[in-house]
Image: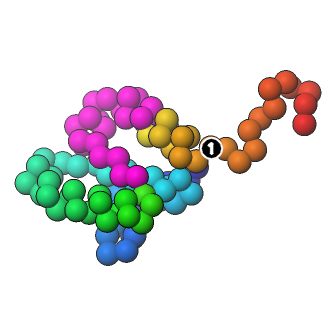
Amino acid sequence: MKFRRQHPIGPYIVDFVCLECGLVVEVDGGQHQEHAKVDHKRDAELGSLGFLVLRFWDNDVLLQTEAVLEQIWTLARQRCPHPRPLSRCAGEG
């Protein structure tokens, strides 16, 4: 999976996006508490385009990096399963 940084989608620029999975990852600082209504509208518009938006607080990204990455990885795999899964046995294929 390839994530792009600061990528335009419609009128928005998202922090990170995997276009193949339709997954947007936003990292929010404290200023986003004041913009919750705007963020909700933005997320809904991106959702109408087929994107799932994940939001994380910047503090969580810094202090709980592994947990954040695990959430992203889990949702990305659900939305974009590997097109050719590996064989169950080493000699198959």
Q: Residue at x 26, y 63 (%)?
A: 42
Magenta residue check for 62: yes
Q: Which residues are magenta?
A: 52-71
What is the count of numbered marks? 1
Q: Residue at x 75, y 44 (%)?
A: 84
Of residue 32 and residue 80, the one placed in the foreground of this image is 80
x, y percent for residue 67? 38, 29
x, y percent for residue 5? 42, 59
Dominant SS of magenta comes to helix
Seen as rendered, the residue at the extreme left is 34
Seen as rendered, the residue at the extreme top is 89
Seen as rendered, the residue at the extreme bottom is 11
Residue 62 visible in the picture: yes
Q: Residues within 10 Å of mark 1 (few under 14, many from 20)?
A: few
Residue 16 visible in the picture: no
x, y percent for residue 46? 36, 63
Element assignment for label 1: loop
Q: Residue at x 53, y 46 (%)?
A: 79
Whether residue 34 is situated above or below residue 10 in the rendered picture: above
Scheme of image coloration:
rainbow
Whether residue 88 is situated above or below residue 52 in the rendered picture: above
x, y percent for residue 48? 38, 64
In which quadrant is the C terminus drawn?
top right
Of residue 41 and residue 58, the one placed in the foreground of this image is 41
Q: Residue at x 23, y 49 (%)?
A: 28
**Residue under label 1:** 81
Magenta residue check for 93: no
Of residue 79 and residue 33, the one placed in the foreground of this image is 79
The amino acid beneath tag 1 is Pro
